Structures are given as C-alpha cells and as structure tokens.
Image: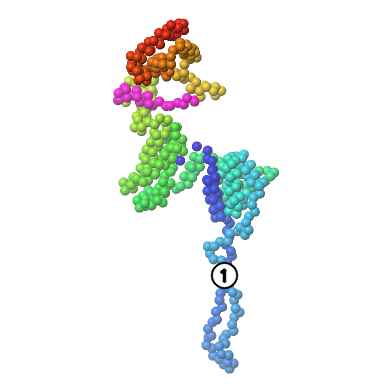
Amino acid sequence: MGSFMASKGSLTSKMKKLVKRVTSKSVTKKAPVKPIAKKSVVNPMKKTAVKAPVKTAAKGAALVSPKPAAKKAEPATPKGKPFIARPDKKSPPPSEETLNRVIERGMTRGFVTENEVLFAFGFVEDHTDLFEEFLDRLERKGLHFVELKEGFLGGGKSRDDVYDKLRITVDKKAEIPISAELTQDSIQMYLREIGKIPLLSAEEEVALAKRKERNDKEAERRLIEANLRLVVSIAKKFVGKQLSLLDLIQEGNVGLFRAVKKFEYRKGYKFSTYATWWIRQAITRALADQSRTIRIPVHMVETINRFKQIERRLIQDLGREPLLEELAAEMDMPLEKVQHIQKISQETVSLETSVGDDDDDSKLEDFIEDVKNISPDKAAARQLLRDYVHEAMRDLTPREQKILEMRFGLEDGVSHTLEEVGREFDVTRERIRQIEAKALEKIQQKDIIHKLRDY
C-alpha cells in the first residue's frame, strides 16, 4: 500500500517475466513457401473424322501423347508455426568480466536496467542457474533492478538497436538511455503501474457490477484495479497526519474493497461517487487507530478536530489565544468537557527528543526533574541516621530490635500497629507496648541519643 528495494523473490518474478518477454520478442521469419505445381490434366479425346487408316493402338493405351510429369510439390510450412531466428545451440554464458562491468556500472547509479542484463546474458533462458547467482550478487550489493518506462526493448525498437546503445566497452562506457522519469521511489513505481490500467465507462461499470452479483471474481478485480487511482487522489489529502502516503493508500484500498462488495448499480450512482465515502471512512478510521501513541476513540477524534478548527478560527478573529470559556460557548459544551478535550488532544513527545542545536547531545529527559531521586546531601543525612539508629539498638535483645523495627518501619518503611506486632510474636498488644517502652528507655540512657535528637 517507505526506497524500493527489490528482494530476491521480486527480482526472480521480474526476471521470469523478462524471459517470457524475450521469448515472445524474438525475431521471427516465415519460411518461404514454394508454389505447388498444378497437376497435369489430360483433355478428353475429341471425336474427329479419320480420313486415313490408323494403326490400332494397344488396348488400354492412351490415344493422346502424355505430357511430361510435373515435379512433386514440396510440402508447405504450416501456418501459425513461425521460424524462430535464434541459434540452434545454447548461447555462450556471459564472462565474469562482463558481469563485473554490469555491476560496477550499477554501483555508480544504484540500479541495473533490464537491457543491461539482457545484453550480458543474450538468451536468459539458456543460463537460468547462472542468472539466479547473478541476482543474488545484485541483492548482496544492494542494487535495484528497474526497467525503462518506454518498454522492455525501448518502445518497439529492435534488439540490435537497443544493444548498440547499451554496449559497454573497456575503453569507453556508452551512455545508457534512461528515461528522465525513472525513479527508485516505490510510490512512483506504484503510480506508474496503476496508471497503465484503463478507466471504465459507466456502461462497463454496470456490466461488471452485474457480473459481480453472480460472484464473478474477475469482475471484482477489474472494478478494484480501475479505481486504484481514485484511492491515491483521496489519500493525498490526508498526507502529513502521522501516516505515510503508502500506508494511507493501503488503508484506502481496504475501503475500496468494501465499496466493491456493497456497490448496487440499480440505484443509478457512479461507482466512484459511492466508493469515495468508503475510502475516506477507511482512511480516517486508520488515522484514529494508528496515528497516536495512545489510541483515542473515533468519535472523540472527530470532536478534537472540531475543537481545533474552532480554536484556529477564533485565533484569526480575535488576534489572540481564545479562553476556554469562549471555546465552550462556541462549541456549545460545558467548560469541564472542553477542558477534557483540550487535555486529551495533546500530542505525546518522546523523552529521547533532541533539544538544542545539532552539535548538542542534550535530550528532553535531561531537563525533567526526577522526583524519585533525592539530592546527595539528603542521601548522606539518611545514611548517617541509619548508622546512628543501628548503633543505638546494638545492645538490645533480638526480640526488642525486631519489635522496634516493625513499630517504626525501620525495616521496610511500613509501620505496624501493636495488634499486628502482637500477632507476629503471639502475645497481647499490651505486652508489645511494655517491651517497646522498655527498649526505648534503654536507648535514652546512651550517649548517642544526643546525635539522634538532631534529626
């Protein structure tokens, strides 16, 4: 529906067509047909008056002298079976030097033409294995395989004329005639292909629609192919909305398929008029589903588009940014809903976005405060406090240390109630309170308590 890289499969399919076209384009001559000699016909003997006696001829002998027998005619060459003017034996395979010259020439341009390949191989069908290896070499080199716009043999010219223009010599490289419109862009190649498909008249559309109702797949295919240019013209209006033109064309083609399925010719509408709505619907639905990092429902996308249109119009009329109250009044919506629309209409931005000049490696994330990380001075103060607490609790029993850790969250940062600690030690909450008070009293009698009071 991104450059046009010819994969091995696509190259192979192209070259199968190449072989077929070479075979069909071979120079043909009809063998001369020698005329068939007319059979000699003996005229019947006329009755004549005989004045003199004539010797009686032998029984069964002809009375008229026989004419000389005609030569036996050679059988004529049957029609429809032309003579192919090509060698009886296989053409010699191209040399490694020839193939290297083709690749070197292609490296300077980034592509190799059909005519160059045909010139190197002669009859491609005679060297299919070698040709497959050559395709692999082209793919590894990253070379494109293209054909001239005016046709395989340059617009009806003979093969010799084309070869004379494409012949490459060691001393001087000839200029290869390539059309100015030749491009590596896949979009241009797609447009060129669909441009070859003829458009349909109104009568042809109706005829194909009738065949489609009888489940004729060929009629559906012709309806689709004849309207591919309509999809491109509609998709161009949506360029710049987060999806590439190729993606927009592919989504529009999905709408075209649906239009062909649902088209009813009896209502009298042209197919292009009917299909336009399905194509636009498919493209807008794809934009709503795929153009945003966070998907927004289709009905909200329409509301956001209306909000932005009104906002742009008010900016032009007022000469300033409109207030939310003015937008709410213009859209006839509550202020809270307009605030919600404004919030969800914001675009997401990557934290990896570059900020500043090209020479600056700063990113957006470098300027955003990380609230989870604490400053170095606070981290040092917390570490000192932790060390002082451990020093103060060193002389307590393991049971008293565990109770204080659970009560004040020294272990995991979560404080527990007396009842929760009591269940942990299988004692009453009152007993836990007594143990806690006794442990705190021991800590207060130590000298380190003065350092803890600073916190």
Viewer-proximal residue among 417 and 219: 417
90 versus 78 height, above or below: above
What x and y, as percent, mark residue 164?
63, 49
315 horizontally vs 95: left or right: left
Residue 242 in view: yes
What x and y, as percent, mark residue 155?
55, 49
Viewer-proximal residue among 111 and 337: 337
Question: Looking at the image, which residue is at 56% across and 44% down?
Answer: 145
- The residue type indicated by label 1 comes to Pro
Task: Reply yes or no: does residue 80 show up in magenta.
Answer: no
Name the image quarter holding residue 33. bottom right
What x and y, as percent, mark residue 44?
53, 83
Which quadrant of the rendered structure holds the N terminus?
Answer: top left
Which quadrant of the rendered structure holds the C terminus?
Answer: top left
Viewer-proximal residue among 193 and 451: 451
Image coloring type: rainbow
Q: According to the image, label 1 marks what residue?
A: 75
Residue 115 in view: no
110 versus 410 height, above or below: below
- Which stretch did the figure color magenta? 332-353
What x and y, as percent, mark residue 233?
43, 39
88 versus 224 height, above or below: below
CA neighbours of label 1 inside 10 A, class few (<14), some (14 to 19), many (20+): few
Question: Looking at the image, which residue is at 41% across and 14% down?
Answer: 400
**Seen from this angle, which residue lies furthest bottom?**
53
Question: Looking at the image, which residue is at 40% across and 51% down?
Answer: 217
Name the image quarter holding residue 441. top left
- Looking at the rendered structure, the secondary structure element under dot 1 is loop
Question: Looking at the image, which residue is at 41% across and 48% down?
Answer: 221
